Image (cartoon, grey):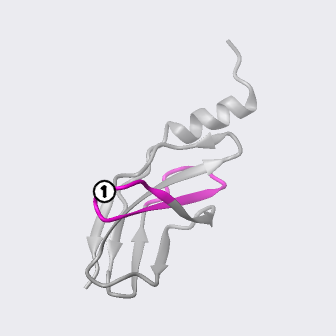
Amino acid sequence: MTLSFSALSRALLLSIPLLACSIDGASAMQATVRWADTATSESGFKIERLVSSTGLYSQIALTAANITSFVDTNLLANTTYCYRVRAYNAAGNSEYSNEMCGTTR
C-alpha cells in the first residue's frame, strides 16, 4: 500500500502527541496557556476553551507553527476556564493535548 503525501503528512502529525499543556498566572484578566511543540510538520496550533466545567469547547485562537504559548485576555474573575490544544496542517488535526483548567481570582 502506498500513502499519498497528504495521508503521510497526516499520519506523521497524528502520531506525535502534544505534551501536557498548562496554565500560568491565571488572574482576573488573563491566563497564559503553554504547551510543548512535539509535532514536526504542523502549520500551527488550535487553542480551544471551555468556560466552567460544563458546556462545549470552542476554538478561540490559531497560532503559527513553532509557537508554544497563548495569552487569553479579558477573562472574568472567579470563573473556571479549561483549555486544550492541537496541532494542524493541510492534512488535518492532531489529537488534543491534555485538558488543563484554572480558576481566575
Tell me if I can see residue 41 in this picture: no
Q: Quadrant of residue 55?
A: bottom left
**Three-letter residue code for mark 1:** Thr
Q: Circle 1 sits on which residue?
A: 54
Q: Residue at x 50, y 67 (%)?
A: 68
Q: Quadrant of the N terminus?
A: top right
Q: Residue at x 66, y 48 (%)?
A: 89
The one nearer the camera, 50 or 97, is 50
Magenta part of the protein: which range? 36-58
On the image, the x and y values in percent for residue 52 come to 30, 65
Above/below status of 51 relative to 77? above
On the image, the x and y values in percent for residue 31 come to 38, 78
The one nearer the camera, 22 or 29, is 29
Above/below status of 51 relative to 56? below
Look at the magenta stretch and give its main secondary structure: loop
Tell me if residue 37 is in the magenta stretch. Answer: yes
